[in-house]
Amino acid sequence: MLSVDRAVMGFAGTVVLASLALAHFESPNWLWLTAFVGANLLQASFTGLCPLAKILKAMGLRTGCAFD
């Protein structure tokens, strides 16, 4: 079963890659989405607050180390 940690990393990676593709093919302004994801990951590392993790926990994903 997918853990919250792995789901967050997978979602962040997908959004970053999608925004890079959109920036390449559509508009450089899509890089702001990449910056937002990076800033959110950075603040989560300091504060421990991750809105996506809270949503995923409420949806029933298990918690635990991503690399167990």
Image (cartoon, grey):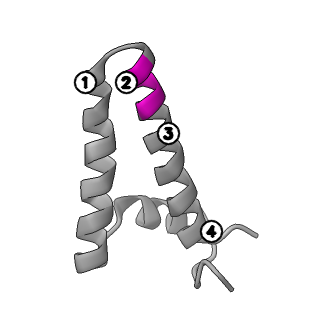
Secondary structure of residue under mark 4: loop
How far apart in space, not on screen, are marks 1 and 4 (Cα)? 33 Å
Q: Mark 1 vs mark 4: which is more N-terminal?
A: 1
Marks 2 & 3, CB-CB < 8 Å contact: no
Identified by mark 1, the residue type is: Asn
Residue named by callout 4 = 61
Can you tell which mark lies on residue 18? none
Nearer to the camera, 51 or 25: 25
Is the residue marked by circle 4 packed among few (<14), some (14-19), or many (20+) residues within 10 Å?
some
Q: Do tag 2 and tag 1 residues touch (Cβ < 8 Å)?
A: yes
31 in the magenta segment: no
- According to the image, label 2 marks what residue? 23
Looking at numbered disc 4 in the image, what kind of residue is underneath it? Leu
Provide the major secondary structure of the magenta segment: helix
Where does the image place residue 24, in percent across and percent down from the top left? 41, 21
- Disc 1 secondary structure class: helix
Q: Where's residue 12, x and y in %?
A: 46, 52
Q: Name the residue under label 3.
A: 17
Mark 2–mark 1 distance (CA, rounded to whole Å): 7 Å
Say which quadrant the N terminus sits in.
bottom right
Give whichever of 24, 42 is nearer the camera.
Answer: 24
| Label 3 SS | helix
